[in-house]
Image: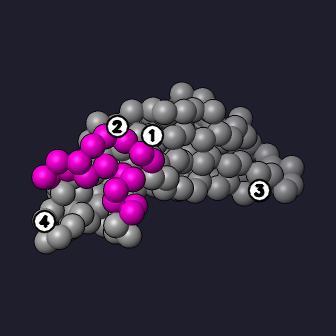
Amino acid sequence: MKKFLSLVSIISVSWSINATTINASDLAASDTQIVAVDQVVPNYPNAQLLDKRSGNVTLAYDLNKQGEPINISVVENSGPKQFVHTSMKALKKSRFQPIQLDSETVAVQGLLLQYDYNFESDTDTSITDLIALSR
């Protein structure tokens, strides 16, 4: 039995630029990378693990000048609501390096992050095995 939780960063087009804010598409064009200082991985909810549920959650967010995710919202959810809760909680706790462009620290608007919750079972796993794995 395998449980996978993967993180996929997606940059999208969004708002316009001003002196202290850049949109995600302009950031991508500058070849500047978003670097995680503390990337919190969401917990796989126990109830969903026991039910062997999979799904993904895509969140839209902005980064402030300190590298903190703000304005987090759900763009898409293909799984249970618990996946949304754990994904939002993890992104709120994550921290990124402040973005520097032309020697200026800027905020970034219009970012997307997808959390994939994949449950695969190669063998017949008992409930006792699943409970032990979720601890």
Q: Residue at x 52, y 47 (%)?
A: 114
Question: On the image, numbered disc 3 is attached to which residue?
Answer: 1
Q: SS at mark 1?
A: strand
| Disc number lying in front (4 or 2) | 4
Of label 2 and label 1, which has the lower sequence position?
Answer: 1
* Percent coordinates x, y for residue 34 in the rendering: 35, 64
| Disc number lying in front (1 or 3) | 1
Q: Is residue 127 above or below residue 82?
A: below
Of label 1 and label 3, which has the lower sequence position?
Answer: 3
The N terminus is located in which quarter?
Answer: bottom right
| Horizontal relation, residue 1 to residue 87: left or right | right
Could you tell me the amino acid type at mark 3?
Met
Q: CA distance from mark 2 to mark 1?
A: 7 Å
In the image, the segment drawn in magenta is: 12-29
Of label 4 and label 3, which has the lower sequence position?
Answer: 3
For the residue carrying disc 4, how many other residues have a C-alpha within 10 Å: few (<14), some (14-19), or many (20+)? few
Q: CA distance from mark 2 to mark 3?
A: 32 Å
Mark identifier at residue 72: 2
Could you tell me the amino acid type at mark 2?
Ile
Mark identifier at residue 104: 4
Q: Residue at x 39, y 63 (%)?
A: 29
Q: CA distance from mark 4 to mark 2?
A: 24 Å
Question: On the image, numbered disc 1 is attached to which residue?
Answer: 59
**Dots 2 and 1: beta carbons under 8 Å?**
yes
| Disc number lying in front (4 or 1) | 4
Could you tell me the amino acid type at mark 1?
Leu
For the residue carrying disc 1, how many other residues have a C-alpha within 10 Å: few (<14), some (14-19), or many (20+)? many
* Percent coordinates x, y for residue 63 in the rendering: 27, 50
Q: Residue at x 21, y 67 (%)?
A: 101
Q: CA distance from mark 1 to mark 3?
A: 28 Å
